[in-house]
Amino acid sequence: MIEKIENKTAKITIVGMGYIGLPTSIAFAQAGFNVNGYDVNEEVINTLKNGKIHIKEPDLQQAFEKVLNSGKLKPTNKLEKSDVFIICVPTPFIKRDNKKLSDISYVETASKAIAPFVEKDTLVILESTVPPLTTDEVVGKIIEEETKLKLNEDFYLSYCPERVLPGKILYELKNNDRIVGSSSEKAQKITKDLYESILTTGKAYTTDTHTAEMCKLVENSYRDVNIAFANELSIIADKIGINVFELIELANKHPRVNILKPGAGVGGHCLAVDPWFIVEKFPEESSLIRTAREKNDYKPQWIVEKIEKELKEKFPNKEKEIIIGILGLSYKPNIDDLRESPSIEIALTLKEKGYNVVGCEPNVLKEEIKGIKNLSLNEILEKSDYLVLTLAHDEFKQNIDLIMSKEVLNVVGITNKGLN
Ligand SMILES: NC(=O)c1ccc[n+]([C@@H]2O[C@H](COP(=O)([O-])OP(=O)(O)OC[C@H]3O[C@@H](n4cnc5c(N)ncnc54)[C@H](O)[C@@H]3O)[C@@H](O)[C@H]2O)c1
């Protein structure tokens, strides 16, 4: 296998062609490997076969076309024998008994699907974010049971979490350091070699599987806790009538203080989800992580309360007649990803309460997003009586003077000097 990786003759199948799987397939195809991009969603595969990508990500379309036309990347909805399988399927949470618990059913299904194609020396890599122990106890066990092959003797299994930033995925895939975890030293070495073939400035570090699984969860919990601190400050600052952005800017003048910016909450597939995987496994020991999650989850609701209070003051007895425009519906600036988006939660909560709500999400070319009319910036400025600026999209920053000339709740603190 090591030679096959070195001379790029190892055949790779990526399982799941989403935000992670598609760019990963492109990176390995660019490095010279023959890559099968497998997905169960026929619409996704048909779109890709027709030469179009189905996600919004800078430079990805061009890079995709090149590897598709060269034949190095083959989108497919049929699995076949491969030297390497890399699993990049979703791992959302489900709400049960007032708890948020991991849903690893996609990982289980994908493991069962690839099992008939796993042979002696096959390397299986899990990239999906999972609760600790999932790699060996779920993926490894399923493949052992389905194939009768022995883990680390007949086939190899690694965990290699993804830490890319949407909007910069292709760049970060090659430049971020990677963590490679496995219970077998040989698997660590093969997997490290494989990832090094796509890394430019980034390095691959090896460890055991459980440390690698925890590493991904800890990184996102760290960020979530720090954002929760900023969000808590924004609520306290509002209570005493001071500007939280100025407060943080000044506090950060301390040489060892670096407070993050508050916002509309925390969304997306990672920060809003992954800390729950630690809480699920270690409920007694993770009170700080859980509180931070709850604090960030509460922020959109707090903003709704703030909006209602402002509307009462600014539009007495007309609150339900005026039009509220939400500027930004994705979960972070300049991307089209709507998953767990706090802005959507704000828009939908207001709508449920009977307010007239429209939105402006320049990164999603749809007339409606989850039942909210998606207007252009010009249209929303013209139609709305009251605006809620929830995201620092470039288009909003460039037009901040125009936006601020209206009645605005500026949740992200953009000023005409740029983002605070
Ligand atoms: N999006 C990110 O920025 C990001 C960053 C780091 C880690 N992750 C993790 O990576 C994993 C994948 O996330 P994503 O954002 O790419 O998800 P996604 O929803 O964009 O894509 C997942 C794809 O997997 C496909 N799929 C589902 N079940 C399948 C199966 N059994 N076989 C083949 N394909 C299947 C879906 O059709 C979908 O196209 C998740 O665990 C996520 O937490 C995501």
Image (cartoon, rainbow, N blue to C red):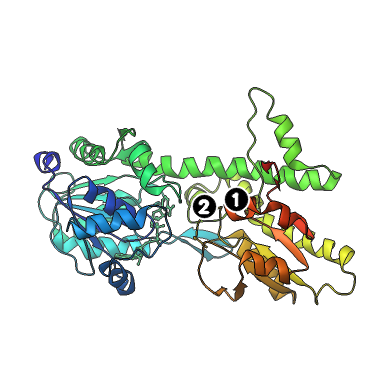
Q: Residue furthest top?
A: 255
The residue depicted at 57 percent of the width and 60 percent of the height is: 341
Q: Position of residue 122 (x, y in %)?
A: 14, 50
Please, is residue 280 above or below residue 113 in the view? above
Please, is residue 136 above or below residue 68 in the view? above
Q: Position of residue 113 (x, y in %)?
A: 23, 65
The residue depicted at 86 percent of the width and 74 percent of the height is: 318
The residue depicted at 22 percent of the width and 39 percent of the height is: 197
305 or 307, which lies in front?
307
State left or right for residue 327 relative to residue 5: right
Q: Position of residue 12 (x, y in %)?
A: 19, 53
Q: Secondary structure at mark 1?
A: helix
> In the rendered structure, which amino acid carries the disc numbered 2?
Trp
Please, is residue 117 above or below residue 161 in the view? below
Categorize mark 1 by other alpha carbons within 10 Å: few (<14), some (14-19), many (20+). many
Q: Which residue is mark 1?
A: 293
State left or right for residue 107 relative to residue 412: left
The residue depicted at 54 percent of the width and 40 percent of the height is: 222
Q: Which residue is mark 2?
A: 276
Residue 17, by quadrant, is bottom left
Q: Position of residue 74 (x, y in %)?
A: 20, 62
Residue 361, by quadrant, is bottom right
Residue 314, by quadrant, is bottom right
Can the viewer see residue 88 in this picture?
no
- Please state, as top left, top right, bottom left or bottom right, where the N terminus lies in the image: top left
Please, is residue 11 above or below residue 254 in the view? below
